[in-house]
Image: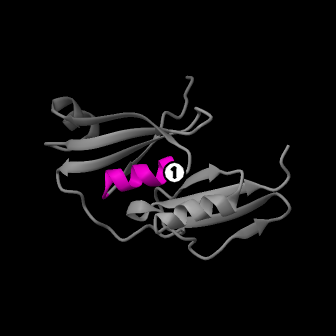
Amino acid sequence: MPIKLENVGIAVRDLEATIAFFTDLGLTVAGRDTVSGEWTDTAVGLDGNHAKIAMLQTPDGHGRIELFEYIHPDAIETKPTRPNEIGMHRVAFSVDNIDEALEIAARHGCHPLRGVATYGDAYKLTYVRGPSGIIVMFAEELKKS
């Protein structure tokens, strides 16, 4: 059976702030909607499901993130995920310049969890805490082809 990754869905506290963060990094908004009704109740498994959604796409056209802000039922606040917790972990992006990506993230109040590391002679890597506590990894390839 052929299979391909369609998107990664992330529930967020503030849709507009999260869109601003990711579009400043270079993603584009591919679509927006407000969804509700029986079909969403069935697909998502929540009665009365009502949410604002936005689909964002990476510049290369291969990666997409679906952001959703719940109108109903109320969103459930949890502690931000830690890197060693089981479950959805992070969203990772290759970037041409990690320092530039960090400057953009900082304008949104998002900073590295610890710092920037170098993995052998291959990558500079860091995790930042993004909007709604999302962990975002930036990776800059050191030996660019």
Residue lying at the far bottom of the rendered structure: 114
Residue 61 drawn above or below residue 124: above
Q: Kindly identify the residue that appears in the image at 86 percent across and 61 percent down.
A: 121
Residue 54 drawn above or below residue 126: above
130 in the magenta segment: no
Per the rendered image, the range of residues in magenta is 13-23
Q: Is the magenta region chiefly helix, strand or loop?
A: helix
| Residue 21 drawn at (x, y percent) | 46, 55
Q: Kindly identify the residue that appears in the image at 55 percent across and 30 percent down.
A: 4
17 in the magenta segment: yes
Q: Kindly identify the residue that appears in the image at 53 percent across and 35 percent down.
A: 5
| Residue 28 drawn at (x, y percent) | 49, 39
Q: Kindly identify the residue that appears in the image at 24 percent across and 50 percent down.
A: 70
The residue nearer to you, when weighing 23 against 116, is 23
| Residue 34 drawn at (x, y percent) | 24, 37
Residue annotated with mark 1: 24
The residue nearer to you, when weighing 22 against 43, is 22
Residue lying at the far left of the rendered structure: 48
Residue 5 visible, this angle: yes
